[in-house]
Amino acid sequence: MTASQVMRRLMLAGIAALLFATAGCGYHPGGKAVRLPTDLHTLYVPTFINGTSTYRIEQTITEDVIRELRSRTNYRVVTTNDGDADATLNGTVTAAIISPLTYDPATGRISSGMVTVTMKASLVTSKGKVLWENPNYLYREQYQVSRDAPSFFEEEEPALGRIANSFAQSLVSDILEAY
């Protein structure tokens, strides 16, 4: 056997060992799948609670969550409690902070800002059993501030709208996928 054949066999053995080692690395999904009950058909989604001083943020978020639930699930989503709902999706906006991020060196004015919103949500059956909850949602959205005074446009509202949309998508995914 030549030296090149020995090297080739050692290399093939090393590759095979590496493939076997990575095939059984113990990877598994991080979440524990909890399926929603099959008798769950109607969800009551009241307007989320606003624990901040940001005007109407809870309404924007609630509307996006309802829209997302209706588009991605077969549940009947109601906004008034008629007593027929199988579960209630509660939410609270716990903080909404708007802060400057960067400044224009020439004028000293703010050139970009950051909106940070924290929320919590839970899905509770009509009998009071918690099916799902997450007390620690955190979203950030950066926005640019217009430098031209005549065409100035307040960018905080669109940034809050983008946060509401992202939150709604994450919330519905988290509930449906149980992660």
Image (cartoon, rainbow, N blue to C red):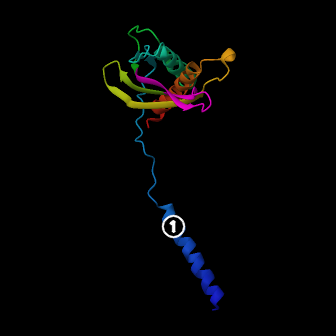
**Residue 70 appears in which quarter of the rendering?**
top right
Q: Residue furthest toward the front? A: 106
Q: Residue at coordinates 63% horizontally, 81% vertically from top-left?
A: 8
The residue where tag 1 is placed is: 20
**Tag 1, which secondary structure?**
helix
- Identify which residue is drawn at 31% across, 25% down: 129
Is most of the magenta stretch helix, strand or loop?
Answer: strand
Residue at the spot 40% in from the left edge and 36% down from the top edge: 34
Residue at image location 49% in from the left, 66% down from the top: 21
Residue 166, given in percent of the width and then of the height, sits at 54, 28
Q: Which of 14 and 143 is in front in this view?
A: 143
Tell me the magenta residue range.
92-115
Residue 90 location, x and y as percent? Answer: 39, 20
Occupied quadrant, residue 175: top left
Around disc 1, counting alpha carbons within 10 Å, would you say few (fewer than 14), some (14 to 19), or many (20 or more)? few
Q: Does the magenta stretch include residue 93?
A: yes
Q: Position of residue 145 (x, y in %)?
A: 61, 24
Is residue 49 found inside the magenta-colored segment of the image?
no
Q: Which residue lies furthest to the left in this view?
A: 128
Please say if 128 is above or below 36: above
Which amino acid does the dot numbered 1 rest on?
A: Phe
Q: Position of residue 31 (x, y in %)?
A: 42, 42
User: Which quadrant holds the C terminus?
Assistant: top left
